Amino acid sequence: MHDNTSKIPTSNSEKFVLAIDFGSGGHKVAIVADSGEVIASADESVTTHLLPHGGAEQDPNEWWQGAKRAVKKVIRNSNISPEDIVAVACDSQWSVVVPVDAHGEPLMQAVHWLDHRGGPHNRKISGGFPRVHGYGFLKLLKWIKLAGFPPTDSGVDSLGHVLFIKNERPDIYQKTFKFLEPMDYLTARLTGKITATQKTMAPFIIVDNRQWGAREYSDELLGLAGLEKEKFPELIPNDGIVGPLRPGVAQELKLHPSTQVIAGISDSNASVIGSGAVGDYETIIYIGTSQYMTCHVPFKKTDINNFMTSIPSPLKNKYYLFGEQLTGGKCVEFFLKNIVYPDDEFNTGQKPEDAYARFYTIASQSPAGSDGVVFLPWLNGSGVPKENPNARGGFINLSLNTTRSHLTRAIMEGLAYNNRWTREGAEKFIGRKIESFRFSGGGALSEVFSQIHADVLDVPIHQVNDPLNTTVRGTALLALVSLGYRSLEDIASLVKIKKVFEPDESNRAVYDKLYTQYLELFKKNKKVFAALNDH
């Protein structure tokens, strides 16, 4: 576990939030001041178990124990009185399903967003005639009208995970009291109340999202999926307060028992708020384990061609662009873990703590365009803007002159090409040009990565200050707004920009050329991907 603490004296006027951010790689727990400053933080890792036939699972008990260890560390190392911590709030990865019993105890490992095993079951319920984009036309209309988007072919959504459990783990399905997303699971452990919201349940594709703030499951969508309403949690308001901490939890964590727990949100909700992008159409690029582009919009809309939709935001009467591209920084992690520092007979040694810094330094030694090497980032299939569960990653156009500096830079450029591709769909979706992006997440720590994005997308990139804490900052600021300690208008001024990266026009020609070939590689390898990976 890693902790980062800066002790400061507190004043009676300051309020603090304990924010728990749970991502694919683990937890970040932080105490955040009402100024947006992170006072103390601690990290805990979590293991993802990759299984045969496209399976991926995590242990919910590991989530809870890791969260408690990090909370205790942060509270112990900070100089904050428990009475000044006014709220606990959780954000998390989503499209991750954990079935629980009536006491909130998990009945099996959580099915992770990397998991494809629900794909056949999604495809079974979504077929029909006539077919449009692979869906039965009338079913597609219902899903778009009510939920905003249909089930994925790949089964990486929560609906696919539930259908996998129902069809292949029927004993677990029968015992399940409720199916939960991670943020709602952690909130239930904190409060003893099993709840969810319209926004956290979106990946289940069974909630009526036509009206912001609706608190009803759709009987039509449940019917299409063949699921029972009783298996899903009570829906509370999107900006709701779940209630105080359970007394035993408050005592164990050394928090005041009156501390309020705010309704959870997804990490994409948290990151756009924590980047200061609270106005409509203010767009961010986030690169952590996953990669996505998002902004708030004042409407509900679906673009099935580009696999984009808008789903309810925690901000009142707002929606936000849902544009998950799947693997992002996971590509860098894969390269370092499996290629550079694997535990094998080559014996290259353990991955050093500064491995990511070394990665970015080596990438800077390669010219723009990596001498023609192109990286395909679809290590677990492609998401936005074109879903293909069979797509896979790879390096293309290697030569005898290719070095690791070319490979490292090509990975970063490949992720930037996918953001450029996504941007084209996003601009059509929101009906306007995106003139700049805020850049956050671990990827935004790198000036090289920031400049590559500026060059590939040909727009200024605003590197958010303290980008690693984007999600905990956003989660905490939203909690302060919910409790009335801050206004929504305050948030933008509390998030600072570290540096603006302008496009280097000398790189325009090479990136235009390689981007064109990147798209061709996706299109022309579709049959190859299907032949190799369609199980």
Image (cartoon, rainbow, N blue to C red):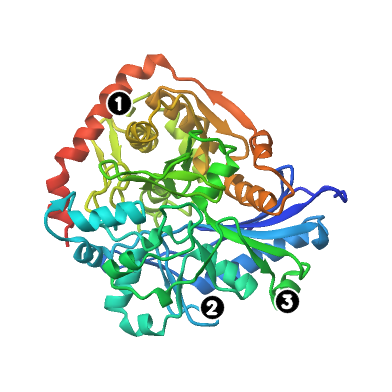
Give the residue displayed 50% in from the left and 65% down from the top: 182
Front label number (2 vs 1): 2
Q: The disc labelled 1 sits on which kind of residue?
A: Asp
Q: Residue 524 location, x and y as percent?
A: 14, 39
Q: Nearer the viewer, residue 428 or 317?
A: 317
Give the residue displayed 30% in from the left and 71% down from the top: 164
> Quadrant location of the N terminus?
bottom right
Label 3 and label 1: CA atoms lie apart by 61 Å
Q: Nearer the viewer, residue 390 or 406?
A: 390
Give the residue displayed 60% in from the left and 37% down from the top: 276
Q: Which mark is residue 371?
A: 1
Q: Nearer the viewer, residue 364 or 84?
A: 84
Q: The disc labelled 2 sits on which kind of residue?
A: Gly
Relative height, residue 506 to residue 242 (above, below): above
Lower sequence index among marks 2 and 1: 2
Relative height, residue 397 to residue 377 (above, below): above
Q: Residue 531 location, x and y as percent?
A: 12, 53
Lower sequence index among marks 3 and 2: 2
> Quadrant location of the C terminus?
bottom left
* Image marks 3 and 2: residues in contact by CB distance under 8 Å: no
- Pointer 2: what residue? 104
Q: The disc labelled 3 sits on which kind of residue?
A: Pro
How packed mark 1 is, by other alpha carbons closer than 10 Å (few <14, some 14-19, many 20 or more), is some
How packed mark 3 is, by other alpha carbons closer than 10 Å (few <14, some 14-19, many 20 or more), is some
Drawn side of residue 148 relative to residue 86, left or right = left
Q: Nearer the viewer, residue 108 or 504?
A: 108
Drawn side of residue 524 relative to residue 357, left or right = left
Drawn side of residue 374 relative to residue 229, left or right = left
Total labels drawn:
3
- Pointer 3: what residue? 247
Label 3 and label 2: CA atoms lie apart by 16 Å
Lower sequence index among marks 3 and 1: 3
